Amino acid sequence: MNSVLLHMNKAQKRPGQGAGLADFNKEEATRVRNFHKSFSEYAVTPLAALPQLAKDLGVGSVHVKDESKRFGLNAFKVLGGSYAIGRLLAERLGRPIEDLGRDELCSDAVRAKLGPITFATATDGNHGRGVAWTAQQLQQHAAVYMPKGSDPIRQKNILATGAECTITDLNYDDAVRLANKNADEHGWLMVQDTAWEGYEDIPRWIMQGYMTLTIEAVEQLKEQGIDRPTHVFLQAGVGSFAGAALGFIASVFGDDLPITTIVEPHQANCIYKSMVAGDGAPHNVTGDLSTLMAGLACGEPSTISWGVLRDYAAASISCPDWIAANGMRILSSPLGGDQRVISGESGAVTTGLLDYIMRRPEAADIRKALKLDASSRILLVSTEGDTSPETFREVVWYGSHAGK
């Protein structure tokens, strides 16, 4: 399917009238960021202003949050895994997270008190690498499971932390079930970025961890003269990142909530399908979930992010892989004066989609529905860099997944 599918959310609610936002307010985001600041690797990632692209597309401004610079790991996912592990260990120590930083958590004294721990997770690459890296910092262990078709370089990066890492013959959601089964059998701690009944605290902490990204972005926009974006596009796999970002944005802007659109690949569009169903319940997508956007190849919405997306997203879009490929090419070859952003396939989909919506005659109805025009101030997030170098070269150098 080469067309782009839009669903406008007629059930959208005003912030405060739908899913609770207490977990995603500015106070919580500040607490999360203070924890991340205790890591020597912490630095605010760039917010790239792309005025030439904005002019070319006929919008007021385009800003892209570049998460390829996060903790030297080329993706944002470490924010969630590290914070969730911090919260887990704080609970075991009987201490508030505010009193604990990286140095103490990595100390011999804390390790002696906690004993050996193995953290288990399933991942397409970025989340697992963040969990494995955090375990390495703590002198602990990680066991990571990847779905079939995962890029071996992503596995190699995880193995380099000293973790166990297996590429399975399962899709993402079944790899999650395998990791959870092994964690139960071996007494490991499951650190997963999707939630299900009876497993919600850790996924919630992971979502909260992502708020470091959004609080930075809002502050950076203000530094660049934009008090509020009019539009935000957020990519979704299980929806944890999108739910956390939208939850924070809804909490901060309230009734002035920007028009926020959730973006997914056709092959794994569980949020879109759930929105279209219109019954308020999350719906799964099954099968091999094969898509260029490996980080978004998830078929089952997270139960704790779904409510936020259902109630506060203005729209949901399902799109073909070539949209993401175009976004990679656009960001890597900027118009004169614009900053270059090296973005992976899951990170670039929103840029490719914006280009499609603003340029294509067949997208006129989408432009109108989303109220995109010359006054629009747009925030995008490039969630990863070239975490699969071979895929990046095939797309950017050699033109694979060409636009239709």
Image (tube, rainbow, N blue to C red):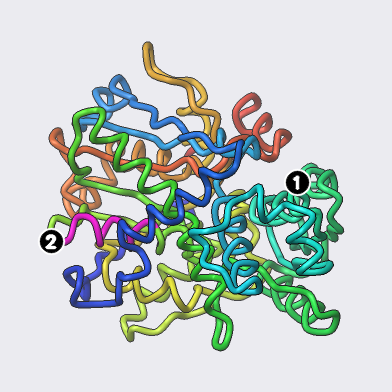
Q: Residue at x 50, y 74 (%)?
A: 302
> What's drawn in magenta, residue-wise?
245-254
Q: Residue at x 65, y 33 (%)?
A: 392
Residue 251 on the magenta segment: yes
> Which residue position is annotated with label 1?
154
Residue 102 on the magenta segment: no
Q: Give the image quarter of residue 112.
A: bottom right
* Percent coordinates x, y for residue 14 in the rendering: 16, 69
Q: Give the image quarter of residue 145.
A: bottom right
Q: Residues within 10 Å of mark 1 (few under 14, many from 20)?
A: many
Left or right of 38? Residue 6 is left
Dot 2 amino acid type: Asp
Q: Is residue 228 above or below residue 257?
A: above
> Which residue position is annotated with label 2?
255
* Percent coordinates x, y for residue 57 in the rendering: 27, 29
First reached walking from the N terminus: tag 1 or tag 2: 1
Dot 1 amino acid type: Arg
Q: Is residue 75 above or below residue 164?
A: above
Magenta span: chief secondary structure? helix
In the picture, the disc for residue 245 is none
